[in-house]
Amino acid sequence: MKRASILLSALLAVLGSMAFAQVQVGVILPTKDEPRWIQDQTRFEAAFKTAGIPTQILFSQGNTATEKANVESLISAGAKVIVICPQDGAGAAAAADEARAAGVKVISYDRLIMGTASVDYYVTFDSFAVGAAWGQFLVSKATGKANNLYLYAGAASDNNAFIFFNGAWSVLQPKIADGTFVIKNSDKAVAVMKKATLTRDEEAAIIGQVTTNWSFGDAKNKAEANLTSAKKADKGTVFIEAPNDGTARAIADAFRTDKDVKKYYITGQDAEVASVQYVIDGKQSMTVLKDVRTLVADAIAAAVAYAKGGAPAQTTTYDNGKIKVPAKPSAIVTVTKENAKAAIVDSGYYPSSYFSGL
Ligand code: BGC
């Protein structure tokens, strides 16, 4: 009996490793032009190498046609699983449909592919918690009433921009409604300030007004335009919801060079090296560490589960407008000057040599 069970587990191990070796995984990332996605590329390369899984990583360079061509080339190369971080959530639906039609499993990575049933799984961080962390940080720094608040958002083509905004709104809205904060750069947000829950259309109207399009240049231009039209009283000490690190640095630089801005608090996310340095230097107030090693491990675990005929772990679902996509969102960590060393260096995320003054 004992011998049989040893034999059985040995057999399962062999079968498991065969399935493992056969996994052919393709990864498609949205752009090389943002450090965030280079983080993912680097972590994927390292993890696939360790796991001995054949793979190919391609970039869409902000172009849906390139993304679709990438999917097609991975299908012809024999990929069994394609991990896609869509450069435009709705735009990626056709490519996902094509992969599904070819019998390939589609894993939506970090950003949700919208409006199609051809998504098998969603590997993501808890993006609502990211936005809530921004809100909590800004609220924790505010005293008294009528604090100047500037809102900025990600690209409207990215469903995450809505989830981040939602998370932030859940914390900020009561503090806007009670007069702790006054929104200075979005009359669309002011118009709905009494509403705890917004419709997608209301959110879209606000995001449309304060979007950075995830572009550092757009973020800088928008911040400069806001500062130009703001009165002196709208400056002084300001609170800024910036949607990620690249845009936060651009917006922070614009606010810092305005002589009427005496002090600013600004959020971010991604723990980009340049932003961790900004946090250490006091030029960015916080970032959110989304440990990409976890996301990569989850994507690989999902691919391996499919290769073995199973399904990846699921704790919740995300509605993409067509289906509820199974997911297991990962936790995030707020990083400030106080915990930067523990969160970023002691955790093994980056070596201390990347930073000065830590
Ligand atoms: C990601 C962020 C990233 C942003 C811009 C979002 O979907 O979750 O980490 O900074 O896109 O690329």
Image: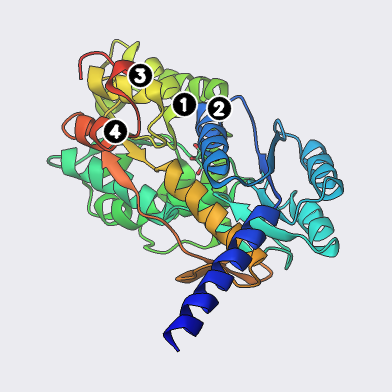
On-image quarter of the N terminus: bottom left
In x, y percent, where is residue 245? 42, 30
Closer mark to the observer between disc 4 and disc 1: 4
**Left or right of 144 in this view: 92:** right
As measured in the structure, the alpha-carbon distance from the residue carrying label 3 to the one carrying label 1 is 15 Å
- The answer to whether the residues at label 4 and label 1 have Cβ atoms under 8 Å apart is no
Q: Is mark 2 within 8 Å of ligand 1?
A: yes
Q: Amino acid at mark 4?
A: Ile
Q: Which mark is residue 246?
A: 1
Where in the figure is residue 87, as x and y percent of width and height? Answer: 67, 41
Determine which residue is flagged by label 2: 34
Q: Nearer the viewer, residue 300 or 270?
A: 300
| Residue matched to label 4 | 344
Disc 2, SS: loop
Label 1 – label 2 distance at C-alpha = 8 Å
Q: Amino acid at mark 1?
A: Gly
Q: Of callouts 3 and 1, which one flags the residue occurring earlier in the amino acid sequence?
A: 1
Q: Residues within 10 Å of mark 4 (few under 14, many from 20)?
A: many
Visible residue check, residue 211: no
Ligand 1 closer than 8 Å to the CB at disc 1? yes
